[in-house]
Amino acid sequence: MKAPKPSELRAMTDEQLTLTIRDLEKSLFQLRFQSATDRLETPSEIRNHKRQIARIKTVQRQRELAKENAK
């Protein structure tokens, strides 16, 4: 899965971000399982998935804070 740029993440809706996080967490679980059974081909995928999840959560938090400040 290609990592989306932060600008692409900001263009997504809240629902799309939630679905993307859910998909990334599922694939991260599978990668960890492969790692435990010594079948993981590229260990850097785990790190990349974690970073993608963190980027999305950052965008979600920024939106949350913007809504609070708008009140």
Image: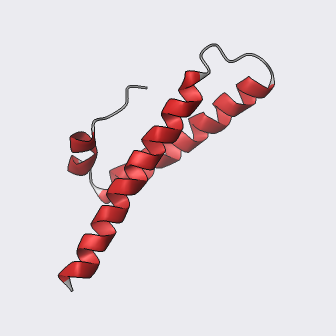
Q: Is residue 7 left or right of residue 53?
A: left
Q: For the N terminus, which image quadrant?
A: top left
Q: Position of residue 68 (x, y in %)?
A: 28, 80
Q: Residue at x 56, y 43 (%)?
A: 25
> Residue 29 versus residue 66: which sits nearer the camera?
66
Q: Residue at x 27, y 55 (%)?
A: 13
Q: Is residue 65 left or right of residue 71?
A: right
Q: Position of residue 50 (x, y in %)?
A: 53, 40
Q: Is residue 31 left or right of residue 59?
A: right
Q: Residue at x 47, y 45 (%)?
A: 53
> Residue 15 versus residue 43: which sits nearer the camera?
43
Outermost residue, right side: 37
Outermost residue, top side: 41
Q: Position of residue 33 (x, y in %)?
A: 74, 31
Q: Position of residue 32 (x, y in %)?
A: 69, 32
Q: Is residue 54 left or right of residue 37?
A: left
Q: Residue at x 56, y 23 (%)?
A: 44
Outermost residue, bottom side: 71
- Above or below, 70 against 25 in this view is below
